[in-house]
Amino acid sequence: DTGVSQNPRHKITKRGQNVTFRCDPISEHNRLYWYRQTLGQGPEFLTYFQNEAQLEKSRLLSDRFSAERPKGSFSTLEIQRTEQGDSAMYLCASSVTGTMGEKLFFGSGTQLSVL
Amino acid sequence: DQQVKQNSPSLSVQEGRISILNCDYTNSMFDYFLWYKKYPAEGPTFLISISSIKDKNEDGRFTVFLNKSAKHLSLHIVPSQPGDSAVYFCAASTLTDYKLSFGAGTTVTVRA
């Protein structure tokens, strides 16, 4: 399978705990994105990388959130001191520039529940 | 600030009929538009896209229409099939910004 892979698929944690999610993009894609989706809403942009460089962060990404992409391959998203409002589906995507524009390929997501 | 809006949260259509999903946007800099389909507990999957230099793009049962002057696009699915039951997201980006802005989605239910 050469699609975008995310682990874990589900994470249940207690408020105040730290969690880390992993994303393995499609190997030839140099851009990697993190999005968050809550029920009834579309995916909201959090941050994106071009190779290992983090080029943009949304204001949604508080200082409790940090993302890394060492060596421009896989990426991790860490949430420190989780809050109940962090409960959401966290989606990773990677992209390639097509003939018309950027097409993002998404993983299956990590569903986070903060109790 | 919601730059991409899908004002119909749900749509129910009979199998074999046409499904029409609508999307409006406010950012005139958007020049690339995409539709994604999402099943429960899965990530969105790319369906079809259109560049701002075109007004129509067709791929099998799926056709996307773009009206730039009205800042409106629509997705037509014909004929609708039970497997089309899913949430459909409209998304847009600009030439200089790779990230996508998404609408809130429309849940399509195809009735047998």
Image (cartoon, coloured by chain):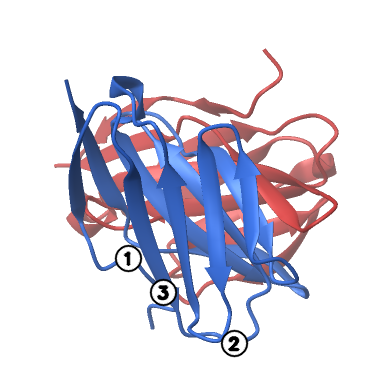
Chain colours: A red, B blue
Q: Are marks 2 and 1 on the same chain?
A: yes
x and y, in percent, of residue A48 in the image? 66, 58
Closest to the observer, A62 or A46: A46
User: Mark 3 packing: few (<14 Cα in 10 Å), some, or many (20+)?
Assistant: many
User: Mark 2 packing: few (<14 Cα in 10 Å), some, or many (20+)?
Assistant: few
* Chain to which mark 2 belongs: B
Q: Is residue A17 left or right of residue B11?
A: right
Question: CA separation, marks 3 and 2?
Answer: 11 Å
Question: CA separation, marks 3 and 1?
Answer: 7 Å
Which numbered circle lies on residue B6?
1
Closest to the observer, A5 or A79: A5
Label 2 or label 1, whichever comes before in sequence order: 1
The picture quadrant where one finds residue A53 is bottom right
x and y, in percent, of residue A26 in the image? 74, 30
In the current view of this chain or complex, which residue is farthest to the top? A1
Which numbered circle lies on residue B28?
2
Instruction: Specify the amino acid type for callout 2.
Output: Ser
* Chain to which mark 3 belongs: B
Image quarter in which the N terminus of chain B is found:
bottom left
Q: Which residue is mark 3?
A: B24
Q: Secondary structure at mark 3?
A: strand
Instruction: Specify the amino acid type for callout 3.
Output: Asp
Question: CA separation, marks 2 and 1?
Answer: 17 Å
Q: Secondary structure at mark 1?
A: loop
- Whether residue B17 is visible: yes
